């Protein structure tokens, strides 16, 4: 019995210095995250405490809480916040109602041969420009000449026109793929054995869905809802195109960032806060642990 | 640093108060030797160009052939002066002010709602008009206006002007409409299709309507509103809101909405109206008068290219260039001799270029300041920052 002398491991600098390797690997992305991403958020937050010269609109760097007081004490702005959250929640619920059956069909009913094609079809709209899609909805929603108005005319009612309804429909359309894809992934990962076990134990379809399927795909639903909710919350272009005179949070920011940057910054902190609250609430459900 | 800024602000504020008090309601330019903001004008003479010029302009004001090869008055300027021009366009007056505050531009085409902010913000310098030979031919009623002249010092050369027009859908509202009432009154036949301009400066449009309908308020100049008058204008805009279909700021969106028949009564610009079907859409200057704009080319305070800047001001004010630019944009030229050189011989007539009567009740965009621009000294007026805030609230 001879012992084979193992050669010392060969490798470059990175192999011999794992710490240096880690720095090389993560240095660029981490500095991007910290400097660019968190840095701009910090700058935004800081700006919110400044003010502007009332006449020239130039930035005045003196500390004040006035912007936040304005944001939280003006009824019109509180309405905008409530409206925006309402729109984002409605869009999320609609996306969910549409996405679950579609994703279920894709993952569990359609044959394996069709699945890649169906996924591609869901992804296709994402290749088209956001603006093109929003303007397409503008044409369809147009009060007199739009397809929707023409469609409901025989019922003796006018089209919905531009407004909250238009915003909700358009945003639902725009963000639907972001809900379908995670839910589809969730359904795909659902082990058949669990469904079999449920059936063996005598559960009918609805019972299995409620007690087995929903808890298992819940993290996927939460992942999708984070997309649809936060994307809706920050959107302002859709409101401009199909919103008529309705404004969302983003519109107020956009309207003010030129004339009163600090106020716009203070206003822009609100969606950040709302999303943080939402994420905290989601975290409590434990859904994030399984992502 | 902070204190010097405060002192500067205090000085600027008192200078405004003094200057405006000196101006008086007649708008006559004062000859008092008040300290004009922005330092001394260039003594001249205009020598050889520095080789480059950075231009900040409204879209359509500095065309170099990239939009339409036939529309080009920048290249000939470059050939004639050796100043290589770099053009940056802006979309709103607020944006122009912001960009000028950032620096890096030599000349800017500023509307009246931007010019005073630039002057008192010390972003632009007084202009020595003796160095701009073509200034002599500018229409007299554009010279020495409150938006381009402060304490007797001129801050630029007028480019052109236009009135904000009332447009309406003839199929819905009939052939003749002559009053802004279709945009403001609750019983308007245009209800649901009203299209106001989406900017704080639109508050002045409400003030113009109030001048005619509620003379008791005593509004003399729509950019000088005391708190009572301002509140009345905002109340009128709140009354308008249920009638509104869409507020517009993107002019392509307005064209779309007017053509689709969803915007039936709106405020608009001549350049938009030119593209609409006159059989369906009517346009007029309303009988109550109107807001409008009068743009001025100004020179940045710290420009390193002062010779090229003066060459540009003279170039843009020359009859041939002014005719070309005004016709391309669809506005009344500022140079009286431009009228003989327009491609369409009726251009000046249709845009009322020399029609002094027409412009009497057109109130060019101006920057509201705390010191009332109409010369009142017994009250404080609502400054632009408050206009901006009120508009943002109204729209929310």
Image: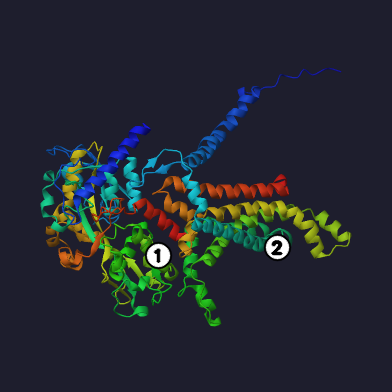
Residue B306 is left or right of residue A92, and the answer is: left
- Quarter of the image with the N terminus of chain B is top left
| Mark 1 Cα-neighbour bin, 10 Å: few <14, some 14–19, many ≥20 | some
**Residue B19 placed where, x, y %?**
22, 46
Residue nearest the viewer, comparing A77 with B26: B26
The residue at the far front in this view is: B378
Mark 2 or mark 1, whichever is nearer to me:
1
**Residue A289 placed where, x, y %?**
72, 45
Q: At numbered mark 2, what does the secondary structure look like: helix, strand or loop?
A: helix
The chain ID associated with circle 2 is A
Q: Are marks 2 and 1 in contact (CB under 8 Å)?
A: no
Residue at 31% in and 65% down: B217
Number of marks? 2
Same chain for labels 2 and 1? Say yes or no.
no
The chain ID associated with circle 1 is B
Q: Which disc is residue B117 wearing?
A: none
**Residue B29 placed where, x, y %?**
16, 51
The residue at the far right in this view is: A201
| Mark 2 Cα-neighbour bin, 10 Å: few <14, some 14–19, many ≥20 | some
Q: At numbered mark 1, what does the secondary structure look like: helix, strand or loop?
A: helix
Residue B34 is left or right of residue B87, and the answer is: left
Q: What residue did someone put label 1 on?
A: B235
Q: Can residue B330 be seen in the rendering of this structure?
A: no
Residue nearest the viewer, comparing B50 with B309: B309
Residue nearest the viewer, comparing B195 with B253: B195
Residue at 31% in and 39% down: B10
Q: Which disc is residue A105 wearing?
A: 2
Q: Can residue B326 be seen in the rendering of this structure?
A: yes
Residue B75 is left or right of residue B7, and the answer is: left
């Amino acid at each position: 019995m001879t012992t084979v002398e193992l050669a010392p491991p060969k490798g470059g600098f990175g192999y011999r210095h794992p710490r240096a390797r880690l720095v090389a690997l993560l240095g660029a992305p981490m500095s991007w995250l910290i400097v660019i991403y968190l840095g701009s958020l910090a700058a935004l937050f800081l700006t919110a405490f400044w003010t502007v010269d009332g006449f020239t609109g130039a930035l005045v760097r003196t500390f004040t809480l006035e912007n936040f007081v304005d944001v939280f004490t003006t009824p019109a702005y509180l309405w905008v916040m409530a409206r925006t959250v309402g729109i984002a929640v409605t869009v999320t619920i609609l996306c969910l109602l549409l996405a679950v059956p579609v994703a279920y069909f894709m993952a569990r009913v359609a044959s394996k041969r069709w699945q890649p094609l169906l996924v591609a079809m869901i992804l296709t709209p994402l290749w088209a420009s956001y603006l093109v899609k929003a303007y397409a909805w503008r044409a369809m929603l147009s009060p007199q000449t739009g397809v929707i108005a023409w469609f409901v005319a025989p019922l003796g009612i006018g089209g919905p026109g531009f407004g909250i309804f238009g915003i909700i429909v358009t945003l639902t359309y725009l963000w639907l793929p972001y809900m379908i894809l995670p839910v589809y992934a969730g359904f795909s990962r659902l082990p058949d054995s669990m469904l079999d076990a449920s059936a063996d134990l005598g559960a009918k379809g609805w019972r299995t869905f409620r007690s087995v399927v929903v808890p298992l795909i819940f993290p996927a639903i939460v992942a999708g809802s984070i997309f649809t909710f936060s994307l809706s919350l920050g959107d302002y272009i859709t409101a401009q195109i199909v919103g008529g005179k309705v404004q969302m949070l983003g519109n107020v920011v956009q309207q003010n960032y030129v004339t009163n940057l600090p106020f716009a910054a203070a206003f822009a902190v609100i969606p950040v806060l709302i999303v943080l609250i939402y994420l905290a609430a989601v975290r409590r459900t434990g859904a994030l642990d399984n992502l | 640093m902070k204190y010097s800024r405060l002192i500067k602000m205090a000085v600027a504020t008192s200078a405004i108060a003094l200057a405006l008090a000196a101006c008086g309601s007649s708008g006559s330019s004062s000859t008092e030797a008040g300290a004009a903001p922005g330092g001394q004008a260039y003594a001249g003479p205009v020598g050889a160009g520095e080789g480059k010029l950075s231009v900040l302009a409204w879209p359509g004001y500095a065309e170099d052939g990239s939009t339409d090869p036939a529309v080009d008055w920048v290249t000939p300027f470059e050939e004639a002066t050796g100043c290589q021009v770099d053009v940056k366009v802006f979309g709103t007056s607020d944006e122009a002010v912001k960009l000028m505050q950032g620096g890096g531009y030599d000349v800017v085409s500023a509307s009246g709602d931007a010019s005073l902010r630039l002057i008192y913000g010390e972003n632009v310098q007084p202009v020595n008009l003796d160095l701009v030979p073509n200034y002599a031919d500018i229409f007299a009623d554009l010279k020495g206006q409150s938006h381009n002249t402060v304490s007797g010092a001129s801050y630029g050369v007028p480019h052109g002007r236009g009135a904000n027009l009332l447009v309406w859908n003839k199929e819905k509202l009939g052939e003749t409409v002559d009053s802004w009432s279709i945009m403001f009154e609750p019983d308007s036949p245009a209800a649901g299709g009203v299209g106001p301009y989406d900017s704080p400066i639109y508050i002045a449009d409400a003030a113009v309507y109030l001048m005619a309908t509620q003379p008791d308020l005593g509004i003399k100049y729509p950019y000088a509103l005391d708190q009572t008058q301002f509140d009345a204008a905002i109340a009128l805009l709140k009354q308008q809101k249920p009638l509104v279909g869409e507020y517009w700021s993107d002019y392509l969106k307005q064209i779309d909405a007017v053509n689709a028949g969803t915007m039936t009564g709106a405020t608009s610009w001549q350049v938009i109206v030119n593209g609409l079907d006159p059989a369906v859409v009517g346009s007029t200057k309303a009988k109550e008068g109107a807001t409008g704009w009068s743009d001025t080319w100004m020179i940045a305070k710290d420009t390193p290219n002062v010779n090229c800047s003066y060459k540009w001001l003279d170039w843009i004010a020359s009859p041939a260039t002014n005719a070309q630019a005004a016709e391309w944009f669809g506005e009344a030229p500022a140079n009286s001799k431009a009228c003989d050189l327009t491609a369409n011989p009726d251009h000046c007539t249709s845009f009322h270029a020399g029609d002094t009567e027409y412009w009497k009740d057109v109130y060019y965009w101006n920057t509201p300041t705390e010191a009332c621009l109409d010369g009142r000294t017994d009250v404080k007026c609502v400054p632009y920052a408050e206009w901006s805030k009120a508009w943002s609230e109204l729209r929310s």
